[in-house]
Image (cartoon, helix red, strand yellow):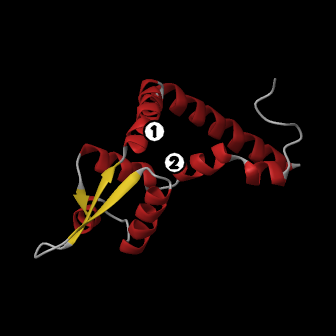
Amino acid sequence: MSLVPVPVTAADRAACRVSDVLARVGDKWSLLVLVLVAERPYGFNELDRAVHELSRRILIRTLRALERDGLVSREVRPGKAAGVTYSATALGRSLLELVVPLGQWVLRHDDEIEAARSAYDKASSTSRAVSTLD
């Protein structure tokens, strides 16, 4: 049994729930934000200060997407210290249980990955130079 139907159609890709979640996990900011709020609850301004080069607009979009997927919860604090607090949900923590080993794998194999990239880049630049001479 194959994990994916062959050929893979646009409709197959659009209907794939795995791709949908992997797109969230693989975007530029979601995992970083999820890791932070899994360590402890964060207020919005605190998160804004915690991640450099993340605009407030993108932070809002990221938090809303994580909340929509059930990975982060948002609690409104009433009173004088009004604001919101974001925390990882049990579902978000269970996702991190899978993602953290992937990160550990990358760190264990970093030298091999870098060597493969260097070899590819060297071979690729050599083949490009040869093809331009033709």
For residue 25, the mark is: 2
Residue at the location (18% across, 74% down)?
82
Instruction: Relative to 53, say whether 73 is above or below.
Output: above
For residue 60, the mark is: none
Give coordinates of residue 134: x percent, y percent: 89, 49
Which residue, as the protein is rendered here, is positioned at the far front? 78
> For the residue labelled by badge 2, is the local secondary structure a helix, a strand or a loop?
helix
- 67 vs 123, left or right, is left
Instruction: Relative to 96, say whether 60 is above or below.
Output: below
Q: Residues within 10 Å of mark 2 (few under 14, many from 20)?
A: some
Q: Specify which label sits upstream in the sequence, 1 or 2.
A: 2
Q: Residues within 10 Å of mark 1 (few under 14, many from 20)?
A: some
Which mark is nearer the camera, 1 or 2? Answer: 1
Q: In which quarter of the image is the N terminus?
A: top right
Are dots 1 and 2 in contact, CB under 8 Å? yes
- 104 vs 11, left or right, is left
> For the residue labelled by badge 1, is the local secondary structure a helix, a strand or a loop?
helix
Give coordinates of residue 29: x percent, y percent: 43, 56
Residue at the location (43% across, 58% down)?
67
Q: In which quarter of the image is residue 43?
A: bottom left
Give coordinates of residue 28: x percent, y percent: 48, 55
Frontmost residue, 120 versus 54: 54
Give coordinates of residue 26: x percent, y percent: 54, 49
Frontmost residue, 103 versus 6: 6
Q: Quadrant of residue 63?
A: bottom left
For residue 95, the mark is: 1
Residue at the location (48% across, 31% down)?
102
Q: What residue type is labelled 1?
A: Leu
Residue at the location (66% across, 47% down)?
17
